[in-house]
Image: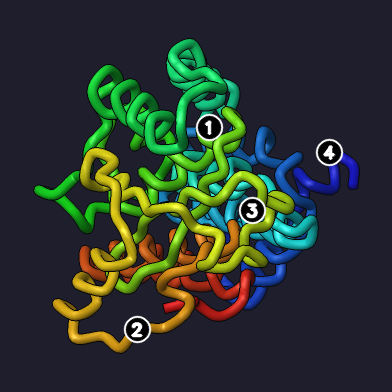
Amino acid sequence: MSENELQALITLIDDPDEGVYSQVRDKIVSYGDHVVPQLERAWEYADLGDLFRDRIEDILHSIHLKVVADRLVAWKETGGEDLLEGALIISRYRYPDMDEQKVKARLASIRQDIWLELNDHLTAFEKVRVFNHIFFQIHGFKGNKRNYHAPQNSYINEVLDSKKGNPLSLAIIYQVLAEDLNLPMRGVNLPNHFVLAYLDEDSIGGADSGQQGEENILFYVNAFSQGDILGRNEINEFLEKLKIEPRASFYAPCSNMDMIRRQLNNLANSYHKQGDSERSQELGTLRDLLGPVVD
């Protein structure tokens, strides 16, 4: 499409006929994000009126949502092996101008601090104690218990800025760092909570943890509670308090796909609690691209 063709479509954006606008909107959205600069320039014209600007904002949002959805589907089709990539895609939904390299640099800095204190002679328990000290005490990460359901607790860039998150977002950051440090840690999908499992290093067979069983777990780590070490008994007690019947999936590692799917579900619920039905529906649609939610 030439710039003249796009410009001709842009002049029709404020057509009073909703049917015309709908066709124009769909056509522009189909061209993808490379038309964003022209749309942003058009928005800046002061004499074009509120309807024109509102509709451009609507088109820009639709383009952005499509870009996020396409990237999420591509991530899924590659197997979802890169957990950080999945988390960054979710952050892109709310922060389209986010600097991903800045996020990665901050993670690399934390990873370096932990790496300097680790050595091969430490036991699995000792390695986690070192990790916890650097992550929670030195860098100050903690669970956001005061504002637990806030959407910002689920965006990785926000969590890195505030040092506060929910159980899942903290576990995602923890696992990303652990993977980079060759520590065999994977997420565990508990109802109303999320923890990590430290696996027997001889049992790790790849990035997708969905094939790992409970029998390979040495212990669990609660990233929401300063890295507390848990055993199976603590998981049992937690389920008993909730009056939930135990399932095998509550004790075994889940896949990265499960984690990102649940993160999208958390965000959809957070926005629903805030009364933001539009964002809640959009995040629900993104979540459904990855398949049904695992409870």
Task: Judge by depth and name the residue closer to the eye, 139 or 211.
Answer: 211
Whichever of labels 1 and 3 marks the residue nearer the N terminus, that label is 3
Cα distance between the residues tagged 1 and 2: 42 Å
Instruction: Identify the residue under disc 2.
Output: 246
How busy is the neighbourhood of tag 3: few (under 14 within 10 Å), some, or many (20 plus)? many
Q: Quadrant of residue 247?
A: bottom left
Q: Secondary structure at mark 3?
A: helix
**Callout 1, which amino acid?**
Asp
Instruction: Identify the residue under disc 3.
Output: 63
| Picture coordinates of residue 194, whole percent (x, y) | 35, 60
Horizontal side of residue 118 vs 238, given as left or right: right
Cα distance between the residues tagged 3 and 4: 17 Å
Task: Specify whether residue 286 is in view.
Answer: no
Instruction: Identify the residue under disc 4.
Output: 3
Q: Are marks 1 and 3 in contact (CB under 8 Å)?
A: no
**Callout 4, which amino acid?**
Glu
The vertical placement of 141 against 65, above or below, is: above
Cα distance between the residues tagged 1 and 4: 24 Å
**Callout 3, which amino acid?**
Ile
Whichever of labels 2 and 3 marks the residue nearer the N terminus, that label is 3
Cα distance between the residues tagged 2 and 3: 43 Å
Q: Are marks 2 and 3 in contact (CB under 8 Å)?
A: no
Whichever of labels 4 and 2 marks the residue nearer the N terminus, that label is 4
Q: Which mark is residue 97?
A: 1
